[in-house]
Image: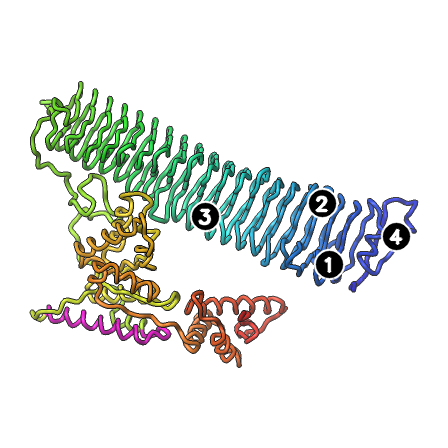
């Protein structure tokens, strides 16, 4: 029933008296109205399902935004099937199977609408409709924010999706909308999604942020074009393309992404122009599969927050970087797999902690007129079939300029390596390569260092001011017998010029590096560099072991865990004191196995254990590095050992915590690289037994299997600590702690209700233990906010008390 009345006026004077009047319902007013009529709706709540079928103007009263609520109990609250104007209405829907506002035909104008709903979609445009939507807001935590489907189009200007239970904007079925200056945030799915052949999305000046899926997702032959847009603070990848998707990004900004900033696969094509990509946790550009291609022009990729290459090209994909900058990253460009290719022109790669360009597994890279600065390794061609060309490039301030190993065969022309710490060009392990008109100046080691009898060709090369010599050919190099390099017209500022290859042994080693696990390859270094000055004594921890054991004791439950950790700590402490007294101390293995369900505090205890050992002087830092299978196991031969060593090096002086460690040894392993990770880890634990404490964790049964089939691993752990599931009383205590920490209180009867709730909640594999308790508290706070937001002047009790009705449904 209507609250208030509806006034209808008509612009034509001949029918003024017949059509001007007041109506008891909106439906009656719409039935009486003709094209051109203006319907001004009085303030109130209208429980009607409205259908606008004529070119009328339907609006709320001026100066009272939000005073007219269209809120039926079910169905579609408002359907538009004509070129009407709809303005200043508040639309509420409750039907999970229907949209709140449906536009089916015509070119209507929708202005200043607020959609607050729990519907399948906030606004849905379909068929031949081409609306203009301005300054509208959609709040739909149950479904899609804006859905444009089945060939529909339209323009959305200055609109905002403030919440969506699925995608913020969904385009499918050949639809093609345009978004201008819109904001999409707090979506549980993708921010912008376009899927299906002939579907197209255009966005200009838009912002996508705080979404749990990808910021932009284009799939299944859809296309999208974004100009001057921001994508940031997503939970998943920033931009995702899959299955023949096409996307153009111009003058866009992608940043603060915990995963890949851009990930594309399956013959997708991406064009980036004047776009910046920064603060990403995995790859800045991740390009996979034959036919997949990235073209980047005048782009900047920088400031990685993770330990992955900025640009990753694999499985036959192609990347082209023209006039781009890549800097402040762990690695700049990795190209892997036969058929994969990267073409880099007039670009800068700088401030690279490890390798600027890595080419492996038969891939190809071509760099023309590029500049590489401040990297551990400028370019590394790693193995057989890997190659390409470096043409007219400069490589400055690296450990090693170019490395060629294991049968790789690149062509290096007119390149200059300036001031390398170890070598300008280094060739070993059957590497080949042709070097033409190349130059090395100011090397801290050799200019050209070729060992293992590698069949390398040097033509018209030049070295100057190389500390250990311009050219060094070692270990059985003999050009005459075809077992060494071929040197033609090369010169050096040394009086004798380059030494001819001879069949002789040499004791020359690269200065400043020990062989380590992966061999003495110049330029390879861990993420923690060797200090340039004498190592000073580590600073004493700011907290004592007693204080941290107190923090352990303060954790809810875990009594058996606390006993085990305290007993182990006591053993270590007494052993340390016996050594100080000149007595023999029992050898205590510090590596541990944690078993139990998720959410039982394993990571928290591992962190405290590391800090306790640091306070006792057993570990240098006591920090925690948490990894899982994906962080250790690579996709290609040789990459797993590198990843595992890098993780171990990050944990040096602290704790390496491997969650779900049993995944390294799956029951149906087949051709799996997990065994390589285990073997590498076992050797590192043996070689650096005092540098890192390793804790492996996972479900009890799976960890028992893991240890039983890997006796080499099992022998290196001192004990297994089992984390039991929390009981209802302990879960209640966690909620009480959360409430106290965030300045909430449990009202009378709420604790009892929580106890019943935790007793009844299913305890199957999906049960999250402490995580479930924290999620329950967060859900209560959210429901509390929904209640209190409706109060005009809430009291302190209103703002702090949580009631039993704030509990989520137990179903």
- Magenta residues, start to end: 553-580
Residue 269 locus on image (x, y percent): 48, 35
Instruction: For the residues labelled 3 and 4, say whether their Cβ atoms are less than 8 Å apart.
Output: no
Q: Is residue 518 above or below residue 718?
A: above
* Earlier residue among tags 1 and 4: 4
Q: Residues within 10 Å of mark 3 (few under 14, many from 20)?
A: many
**Mark 2 or 3, closer to the camera:** 3
Instruction: For the residues labelled 1 and 4, say whether their Cβ atoms are less than 8 Å apart.
Output: no
* Earlier residue among tags 4 and 2: 4
Q: Which residue is mark 1?
A: 68
Question: Residue at the top extreme?
Answer: 489
Q: Which residue is mark 2?
A: 109
Q: Quadrant of residue 374?
A: top left
**Mark 3 or 4, closer to the camera:** 3
Query: What residue is at 57 percent from the left and 55 percent from the top?
Result: 164
Query: What residue is at 45 percent from the left and 46 percent from the top?
Result: 255
If the image is split into quadrants, where does the C terminus sit?
bottom right
**Element assignment for label 4:** loop
* Earlier residue among tags 3 and 4: 4
* Main secondary structure of the magenta stretch: helix
Instruction: For the residues labelled 2 and 3, say whether their Cβ atoms are less than 8 Å apart.
Output: no
Q: Which residue is mark 4?
A: 20
């Amino acid at each position: 029933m209507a609250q208030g009345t509806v006034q209808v006026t008509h612009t034509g004077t001949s029918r003024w008296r017949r059509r001007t009047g007041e109506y008891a319902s909106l439906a009656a007013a719409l039935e009486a109205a003709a094209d051109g009529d203006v319907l001004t709706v009085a303030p109130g709540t209208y429980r009607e399902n409205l259908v606008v079928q004529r070119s009328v103007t339907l609006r709320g009263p001026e100066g009272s935004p939000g005073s007219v609520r269209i809120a039926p109990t079910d169905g579609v609250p408002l359907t538009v099937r004509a070129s009407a104007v709809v303005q200043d209405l508040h639309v509420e829907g409750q039907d999970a199977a229907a949209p709140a506002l449906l536009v089916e035909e015509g070119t209507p104008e929708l202005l200043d609408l607020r959609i607050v709903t729990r519907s399948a979609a906030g606004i849905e445009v379909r068929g031949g409709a081409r609306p203009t939507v301005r300054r509208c807001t959609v709040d739909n935590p149950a479904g899609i924010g804006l859905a444009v489907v089945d060939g529909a189009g339209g323009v959305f200007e200055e609109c905002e999706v403030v919440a969506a239970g699925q995608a913020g904007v969904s385009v499918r079925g050949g639809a093609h909308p345009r978004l201008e200056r819109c904001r999409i945030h707090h979506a549980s799915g993708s921010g912008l999604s376009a899927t299906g052949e002939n579907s197209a999305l255009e966005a200009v000046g838009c912002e996508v942020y705080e979404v749990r899926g990808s910021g932009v997702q284009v799939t299944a032959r859809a296309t999208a074009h974004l100009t001057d847009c921001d994508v940031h603070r997503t939970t998943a990848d920033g931009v995702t393309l899959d299955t023949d998707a096409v996307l153009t990004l111009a003058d866009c900004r992608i940043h603060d992404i915990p995963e890949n900033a851009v990930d594309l696969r399956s013959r997708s094509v991406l064009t980036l122009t004047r776009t910046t990509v920064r603060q990403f946790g995995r790859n800045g550009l991740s390009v996979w599969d034959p036919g997949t291609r990235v073209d980047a022009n005048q782009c900047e990729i920088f400031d990685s927050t993770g330990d992955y290459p900025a640009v990753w090209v694999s499985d036959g994909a192609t990347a082209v970087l023209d006039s781009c900058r890549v800097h402040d990253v762990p690695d700049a460009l990795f190209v892997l797999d036969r058929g994969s290719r990267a073409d880099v022109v007039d670009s800068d790669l700088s401030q690279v902690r490890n390798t600027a360009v890595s080419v492996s597994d038969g891939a190809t890279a071509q760099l023309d007129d590029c500049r590489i600065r401040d990297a551990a390794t400028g370019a590394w061609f790693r193995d057989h079939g890997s190659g390409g060309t470096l043409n007219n490039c400069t490589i400055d301030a690296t450990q090693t300029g170019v490395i060629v190993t294991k049968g790789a065969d690149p062509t290096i022309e007119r390149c200059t390596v300036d001031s390398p710490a170890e070598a300008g060009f280094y060739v070993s392990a059957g590497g080949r390569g042709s070097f033409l008109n190349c130059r090395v100046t100011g090397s801290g080691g050799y200019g050209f260092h070729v060992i293992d009898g590698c069949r390398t060709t040097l033509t018209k090369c030049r070295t100057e001011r190389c500390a250990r010599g311009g050219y060094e050919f070692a270990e059985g190099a003999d050009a005459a017998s075809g077992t060494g390099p071929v040197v033609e017209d090369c010169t050096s500022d040394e009086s004798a010029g380059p030494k001819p290859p001879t069949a002789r042994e040499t004791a020359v080693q690269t200065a400043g590096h020990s062989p380590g696990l992966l061999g003495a390859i110049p330029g390879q270094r861990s993420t923690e560099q060797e200090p340039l000055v004498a190592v000073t004594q580590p600073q004493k921890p700011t907290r004592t072991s007693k204080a941290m054991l107190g923090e352990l004791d303060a954790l809810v439950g875990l009594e058996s865990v606390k006993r085990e950790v305290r007993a182990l700590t006591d053993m270590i402490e007494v052993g340390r004191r016996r050594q100080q007294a000149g007595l023999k101390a029992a050898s205590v293995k510090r590596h541990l196995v944690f078993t139990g369900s998720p959410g039982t505090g394993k990571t928290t205890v591992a962190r405290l254990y590391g800090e306790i050992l640091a306070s006792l002087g057993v570990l240098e830092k006591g920090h925690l590095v948490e990894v899982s299978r994906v962080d250790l196991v690579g996709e290609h031969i040789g990459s797993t050992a590198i990843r595992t060593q890098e993780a171990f090096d990050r944990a040096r002086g602290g704790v390496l915590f491997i969650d779900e460690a049993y995944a390294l040894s799956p029951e149906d392993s087949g051709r799996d690289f997990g065994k390589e990770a285990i073997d590498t880890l076992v050797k590192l634990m043996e070689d650096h037994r005092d540098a890192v404490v390793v804790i492996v964790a996972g479900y009890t049964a799976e960890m028992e299997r893991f240890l039983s089939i890997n006796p080499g691993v099992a022998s290196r752990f001192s004990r297994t600590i089992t984390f039991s599931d929390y009981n209802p009383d302990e879960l209640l205590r966690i909620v009480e702690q959360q409430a106290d920490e965030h300045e909430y209180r449990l009202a009378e009867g709420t604790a009892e209700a929580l106890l019943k709730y935790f007793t009844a909640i299913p305890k199957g594999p999906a049960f999250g233990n402490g995580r479930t308790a924290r999620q329950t508290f967060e859900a209560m706070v959210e429901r509390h906010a929904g209640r209190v937001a409706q109060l005009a002047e809430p009291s302190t009790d209103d703002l702090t008390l949580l009631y039993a009705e704030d509990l989520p449904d137990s179903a």
